[in-house]
Image (cartoon, rainbow, N blue to C red):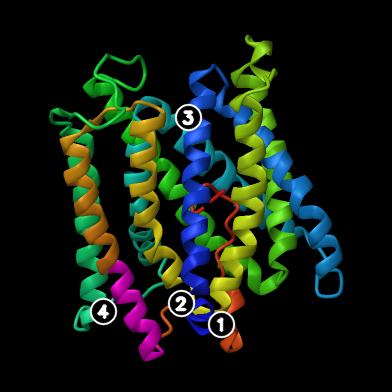
């Protein structure tokens, strides 16, 4: 029994991460339904994440933390913009126009978006004669096809236990709102992918993972505060919180999605690599969809189910291609002096991922 638990530990930890990340989206959606601004939610979340991570970063990495330079700080500002402003803000905005279950399905396309951006930035080289490259290209096309299907085809609402049959305001959107929400979610995916690519580059110059996550949360809190100030300057009451999910949701997101999830994903990536973390993301979609129908009484549409299945198939083609490259020792991203350790590939789950993937998100 002890041996089985030891072998199953990484998978059990990833299972816990997916449940924790799913809970963040459910709590966030409930808080926004009660009137909490998604801009303010993002500010509070990152302030709490900074306060949670900073003591551990200061104590555990004081001997390995390199000196801060202007270039590194500029990259941290860019990381905060990609992750906090583009990813978190637009993902929550897209969720307001659609639903929590729809968000979880669309965000599965993040690995494919990352691959596409890496190709455009010439960080990955296309070798179409190899099966692994073909799998990633086909998987990316399939993933975007599934996302497009979900955006353009809603289909009939399905009757699920606990789901509402009554019209809802923002969560029963018109076709235009559904399409706009999908665009916002894709912007969030692009922000997360840009964050993932840039963080690999930054970690080579600043190899203190927890300190980097702390800096990103701190700078992101400042940036999101400026955005929230201008977005909500006519609604000062938007900054108030109540003793319900409007308080619990950002606290949960900051501590669990940006604190505990960071540690767990870091442990698993050290032993098993980043691919296995990505492979667990569809499980979060199933958990969120189930909880959203039961807890939030969200409607589930046939188009979302079909599109989600297509997205997951595309995701696993991309993951399969990348895992085979790792097994074959193919290094697609050029790096100086063979500086390509597991730490360089680590995904900091500062998001909700959001994976929190990682995530390895919130």
The residues bearing labels 3 and 4 have C-alpha atoms spaced at a distance of 38 Å
Q: Are marks 3 and 2 in contact (CB under 8 Å)?
A: no
Which structural element holds mark 4? helix
Position in image of residue 82 (x %, y %): 55, 48
Residue for point 64% across, 56% down:
260
Span colored in magenta: 318-329
Which structural element holds mark 3? helix
The residue pinned by badge 4 equals: 132
Label 3 vs label 1, nearer the camera: 3
Q: Which mark is residue 340?
A: 1
Label 3 vs label 4, nearer the camera: 3
Position in image of residue 354 (x %, y %): 49, 50
Position in image of residue 77 (x %, y %): 67, 49
Q: Residues within 10 Å of mark 1 (few under 14, many from 20)?
A: some
Assess whether residue 323 is covered by the magenta stretch.
yes
Residue for point 60% across, 88% down:
337
């Amino acid at each position: 029994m002890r041996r089985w638990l030891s072998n199953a530990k990484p998978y059990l930890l990833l299972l816990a991460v997916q449940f924790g990340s799913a809970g963040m989206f459910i709590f966030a959606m409930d808080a926004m339904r009660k009137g909490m601004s998604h801009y303010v939610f993002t500010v509070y979340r990152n302030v709490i994440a900074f306060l949670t991570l900073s003591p551990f970063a200061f104590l555990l990495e004081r001997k390995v933390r390199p000196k801060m330079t202007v270039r590194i700080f500029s990259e941290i500002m860019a990381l905060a913009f990609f992750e906090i402003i583009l990813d978190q803000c637009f993902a929550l905005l897209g969720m307001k126009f659609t639903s929590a279950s729809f968000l979880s399905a669309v965000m599965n396309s993040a690995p494919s978006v990352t691959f596409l951006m890496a190709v455009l930035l010439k960080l990955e080289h296309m070798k179409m004669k190899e099966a692994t490259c073909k799998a990633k290209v086909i998987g990316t096309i399939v993933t975007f096809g599934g996302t497009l299907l979900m955006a353009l085809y809603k289909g009939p609402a399905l009757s699920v236990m606990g789901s509402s049959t009554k019209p809802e305001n923002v969560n029963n959107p018109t076709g235009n709102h559904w399409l706009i929400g999908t665009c916002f979610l894709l912007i969030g995916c692009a922000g997360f992918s840009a964050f993932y690519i840039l963080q690999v580059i930054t970690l080579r110059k600043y190899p203190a993972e927890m300190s980097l996550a702390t800096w990103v949360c701190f700078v992101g809190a400042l940036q999101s505060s400026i955005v929230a100030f201008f977005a909500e300057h006519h609604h000062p009451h938007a900054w108030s919180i109540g003793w319900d999910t409007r308080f619990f949701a950002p606290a949960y997101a900051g501590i669990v999605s940006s604190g505990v999830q960071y540690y767990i994903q870091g442990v698993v990536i050290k032993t098993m690599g980043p691919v296995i973390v990505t492979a667990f993301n569809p499980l979060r979609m199933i958990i969120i969809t189930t909880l959203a129908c039961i807890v939030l009484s969200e409607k589930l549409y046939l188009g979302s189910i079909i599109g989600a299945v297509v997205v997951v198939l595309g995701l696993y083609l991309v993951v399969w291609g990348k895992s085979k490259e790792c097994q074959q020792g193919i290094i697609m991203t050029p790096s100086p002096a063979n500086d390509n350790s597991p730490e360089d590939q680590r995904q900091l789950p500062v998001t909700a991922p959001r994976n929190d993937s990682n995530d390895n998100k919130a």
